[in-house]
Amino acid sequence: MILTEPAAMPLDKHFLPENQLLLNAVGEGIYGFDLNGNAVFINPAAERMTGWKNEELLGKNIHNCHHHSHADGSHYPQEDCPIYNTLKDGIAREITHDVFWRKDGSSFPVHYSSTPVYRDNKLIGVVAIFRDISIQKQTEQSLRQALAQVQALSEQLASENHYLQAELADKTGDVDISGSSAVIRHMIQQLHMVANTDSTVLICGENGTGKELVARNLHQLSRRKDKPMISVNCAAFSASLLESELFGHEKGAFTGATQQRKGRFELAHQGTLFLDEVAELSLEAQSKLLRVIQEQSFERLGGSETIKVDIRLVAASHHDLLKRVEQGLFRMDLYYRLNVFPIQVPPLRARLEDMPELVSHILHSLNRKLGKKLRGVSQKGLQKLMAYSWPGNVRELQNILEREAILSQTDILQIHAMPTHQLQTQTAASPLQTLAEAEAQHIEQTLKQLNWRISGPNGAANVLGVPPSTLRSRMKKLGITRQPPAEE
C-alpha cells in the first residue's frame, strides 16, 4: 500500500480497484497515517469496531479520538504512542496489551501493529492494523480464574490430606467407646445430647483416658460428620509455631514461609476443630483463640485478609482449667467460652467393670495391627489387670496388652509383666509436671538459693544463663514473686 505525502492527493485515489476491494474486505481494522499523524485511510472493519466513520476521521489526528487514554482512564500522551513513534523512527512495532476507545466512550482490548511505509526509500507514512481481542481476553481471564480455583482446591485437598493422614497414622478409624459401666453410659448419654448442636465442648480427664476418642465420637455423632475433624495438640508446638499452625501463613510471613499455607482453623471449615491439651496455649495464643471463637474469623500470619470460618470447637485438657485460671496461667474469659458443655472422661480405675470389654476391644485392634489371632486374656491375667490402679489409664492398658501380644506364642495372653508397686508410689508422690511448671519450680529454687537476687555476677539471671530482663519476663508470666523482697 502506498501513502501520499501530506500535500498529495488522498490515498484512495492511488489504489487500484482490486486493492481497494481487498482492504475493505479484510476483518482487521486498518488505518493509514501521513507523516503528520493524520488519517488518510480507514477501512470498514475499523469503522465497525470503533464506531468512528471514515468521513469523521479522514484528515484528523486519530490518536485524540481512539487512543487518548490508557485502560485505567489515565492520559495517554501522543509522544508515547507506538504508532507515532514509528512515524518518527520508521521502526515497526507490535503491541499486545492496549485498548482503543470507541466513539461512544467505551474501550476494547486490541492487538495491533504499526508498520512504516516507504516510497523511493523515503518514509511517507504508517499503516496500523488492529483487531478486537475482547473474546480472547475474556477466555484468558476465565481460564486464569478456573486455574486459580483448581490450584486452590488442589492446595486445600493436599493440606487436608496431609492432616488427615497424620490423624489416621496410628488409628484404626474405630470411634466406638467400649464399656457399659454407669459412668460410661452417663458420658455417652451426654455425647448424644450435645452432638447435634454447635455448642463448644470441653472434655476433661486424666492423661490416657481417651479424650481424643471421645472427641472423634462426638464428631461422628454430629451433623458435621461428613466434613473433616482437624486435631491440634497444643502442647506439641511453640507459641510462634502454634499461631502458624492454627491460623496459617502467607508467603514470606517469616523465614522459611516459601508459600501460602492454610491453618487448622481454615481446614476445619464446616467441620470440627479439636484442640487437645488446650491448657498449654500461651496467654497470647489464648487471646487470639478467644477472638476467633467470638467472631468466627481470623487473618493468616503475615496477611490482612479476614477469613470467615464455620467450625465446631471441641477442646480437651488433663489440667483443672479453673485452677489454671486462679494461677494466672489461663484466661478466665476463654475458660467460660470453652466450658459451655463439659464432659468428664472417667479414669480406668473408676470403671474396672469395663475391663473385659476393653480388653476384647483392644485385642481386636491388635490382631489387625500385628496380624495375630489372639482370642483373649487368661483368667489369672485378667485378675492382675483388675487389681492394678492404672495411673496411665486406657493408654497404659493398650501398651501392656500390645507388649504381651508381641511376646505371646499362644492365642491366650498370660500377662506376665505388670508395673511394680514402687513405680505406682513414685508416680503418686511425684506427679508429672508440665514444662512451664518445671521451669517455674527451677527458677524459684534458684532465686531462693541466691536470696532472690536477679542481676549481677551472683544473680539468678547469670546462673541461669539468661539476661535479667528475660528472667523478669519469665517470672511475671509464670506468676513467680519475690518472697521476701531483696535488694538487687
Image (cartoon, helix red, strand yellow):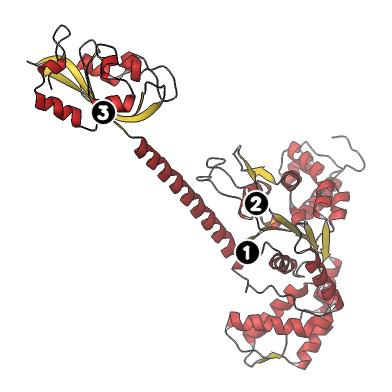
What is the three-letter code of the residue carrying label 1?
Answer: Asp
Amino acid type indicated by mark 3: Ala
Q: Give residue 261's position: percent from left, percent from top.
A: 55, 48
Circle 2 packing at 10 Å, graded few (<14), some (14-19), many (20+), is many
Q: Residue furthest right?
A: 484
Q: Nearer the viewer, residue 265 or 365?
A: 265
At mark 2, the secondary structure is: helix
Task: Of the two numbered discs 3 and 2 on the same chain, state the one appearing first in sequence.
Answer: 3
Residue at 56% across, 58% down:
160
Q: Position of residue 347 (x, y in %)?
A: 82, 72
Q: Is residue 433 above or below residue 349?
A: above
Q: Position of residue 411 (x, y in %)?
A: 65, 92
Mark 1 or mark 3: name the one nearer the start of the chain.
3
Is residue 30 in sight in this rendering? Answer: yes
Residue mark closest to the camera, 2 vs 1: 1
C-alpha span from label 2 to label 1: 17 Å
Along the line of sight, the residue nearer the viewer: 434 or 324: 324
Q: What is the quadrant of residue 104 in the picture?
A: top left
Residue 197 to residue 100: above or below: below
Residue 51 position within the rendered picture, expressed as x and y whole percent measured from the top left: 33, 23
- The residue beneath circle 1 is 226
Gap between marks 1 and 3 measured at Cα: 57 Å
Q: Earlier in the sequence, mark 2 or mark 1?
A: 1
- Please report the residue visible at 41 percent of the width from the left and 16 percent of the height from the top: 75
Q: Say if residue 413 shows up in the picture.
A: no
Where, quadrant-wise, is the C terminus in this rendering? top right
Q: Which residue is mark 3?
A: 45
Q: Which residue is mark 2?
A: 265
Q: For the image shown, how many numbered marks are present on the structure?
A: 3
Q: Is residue 372 left or right of residue 350?
A: left
